[in-house]
């Protein structure tokens, strides 16, 4: 039970004003998407280069990070597609490398849903994964079409991914998982999110009128950004057969507070929104590092002062106060929970 969201834009450059509007709308969508999962966050930028950014922060805090804002800034002249994700962990440890999006072969993607035939898929695809979603993208990478790929699945899914062509965004869903889109012709930009209200609210806040549509089930939508124009996306659709599971309850319901409104598993105090200056990429809030080190200290029952962040390899390290030995975040997890076969996943992947 996670959230996927993102954007696909025409190669036509944004004006400065257009980029500011897109940035604000996407920020609202990303923040609202936290209600579908707060265990971790991630975003991938796809264009002239591909890079995946991940964090243990909930999305409402991740949007103030240097990494998230670098991804959004790349829309100016480098990226065509951003793939966002908020995770509610169902399979795999809550560590940064297990956050979505994932890169598997030629595929970069994010998944909302669960996989029920993990062992079968691992055997068939000859791949061991710490997160079940990686098996889905392994199948998509290994097959030439979506119909052959979904034959491997016993899964609930809504998917966003890019395969080989950095200008084509693929979206699809089965019966049990929602996925919505809105196209803004004057921006030549497509927004997508798990829930329609995320897009509706974000557009309304900035006085943008657009229809929000639910994607049809068992249909692969291929949005080629080079074909976006001032009227429509010129999307291509491919139908596929898939038998969804039948449930007697709403699998997309999330925890509620006493008063019936969503409450995250980690109860963060509301903070004033932090600004980000497009013209000064090096001036970013250090509160992001402070928040994440508190997360690590809570997870591993350590002091925040024992952790430091190495920007050169995007890794947190723990210094044992007794021995002064240094351990990476993943080594700490292996030591604490005995996951000796934990698969390392590249977070920054060019």
Image: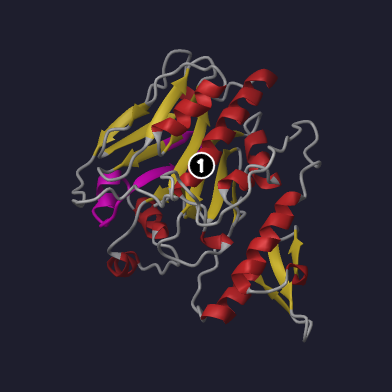
Q: Going 43% across and 50% down the picture, which residue do you hit?
A: 258
Left or right of 207: which side holds 147?
left
Stretch of the chain drawn in magenta:
144-169
Left or right of 171: which side holds 7?
right
Q: Position of residue 278 (x, y in %)?
A: 74, 31
Q: Position of residue 260 (x, y in %)?
A: 41, 45
Q: Going 73% across and 67% down the picture, which residue do you hit?
A: 304
Left or right of 131: which side holds 38?
right
Read off the residue under disc 1: 83
From where the camera sits, is residue 310 visible?
yes
Q: Position of residue 123 (x, y in %)?
A: 31, 70
Between 43 and 45, the residue placed more toward the observer is: 43
From where the camera sits, is residue 163 visible?
no
Q: Is residue 158 above or below residue 328?
A: above
Between 85 and 306, the residue placed more toward the observer is: 306
Q: Quadrant of residue 121?
A: bottom left
Q: Quick one: SS at disc 1?
A: strand
Q: Going 58% across and 21% down the picture, which residue do you hit?
A: 12
Left or right of 343: which side holds 289?
right
Q: Position of residue 51 (x, y in %)?
A: 60, 47
Q: Is residue 64 magenta?
A: no
Q: How many marks?
A: 1
């Amino acid at each position: 039970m996670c959230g996927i969201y993102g954007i696909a834009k025409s190669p036509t450059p944004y004006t400065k004003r257009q980029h500011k509007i897109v940035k604000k709308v996407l920020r609202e969508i990303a923040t609202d998407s936290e209600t579908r999962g707060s265990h971790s966050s991630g975003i991938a930028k796809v264009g002239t280069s591909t890079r995946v950014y991940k964090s243990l922060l909930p999305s409402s805090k991740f949007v103030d990070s240097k990494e998230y804002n670098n991804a959004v800034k790349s829309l100016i002249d480098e990226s065509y597609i951003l793939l966002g994700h908020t995770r509610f962990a169902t399979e795999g440890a809550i560590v940064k490398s297990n956050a979505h999006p994932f890169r598997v072969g030629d595929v970069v993607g994010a998944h909302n849903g669960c996989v029920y035939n993990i062992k079968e898929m691992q055997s068939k695809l000859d791949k061991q994964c710490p997160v079940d979603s990686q098996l889905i993208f392994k199948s998509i990478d290994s097959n030439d079409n979506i119909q052959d790929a979904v034959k491997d699945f016993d899964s609930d899914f809504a998917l966003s991914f890019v395969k080989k062509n950095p200008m084509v965004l693929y979206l699809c869903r089965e019966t049990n998982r929602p996925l919505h889109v809105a196209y803004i012709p004057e921006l030549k930009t497509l927004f997508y999110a798990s829930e329609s209200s995320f897009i509706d609210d974000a557009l309304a806040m900035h006085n943008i009128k657009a229809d929000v549509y639910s994607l049809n089930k068992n249909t692969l939508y291929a949005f080629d950004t080079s074909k976006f124009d001032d009227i429509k996306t010129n999307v291509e659709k491919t139908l596929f057969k898939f038998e969804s599971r039948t449930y007697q309850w709403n699998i997309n319901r999330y925890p509620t507070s006493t008063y019936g409104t969503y409450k995250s598993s980690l109860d963060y105090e509301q903070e004033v929104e932090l600004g980000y200056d497009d013209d000064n990429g090096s001036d970013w809030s250090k509160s992001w590092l402070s928040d994440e080190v508190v997360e690590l200290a809570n997870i591993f029952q350590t002091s925040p002062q024992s952790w430091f962040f190495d920007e050169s390899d995007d890794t947190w390290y723990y210094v044992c106060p007794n021995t002064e030995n240094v351990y990476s975040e993943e080594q700490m997890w292996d030591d604490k929970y005995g996951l000796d076969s934990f698969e390392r996943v590249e977070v920054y992947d060019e």
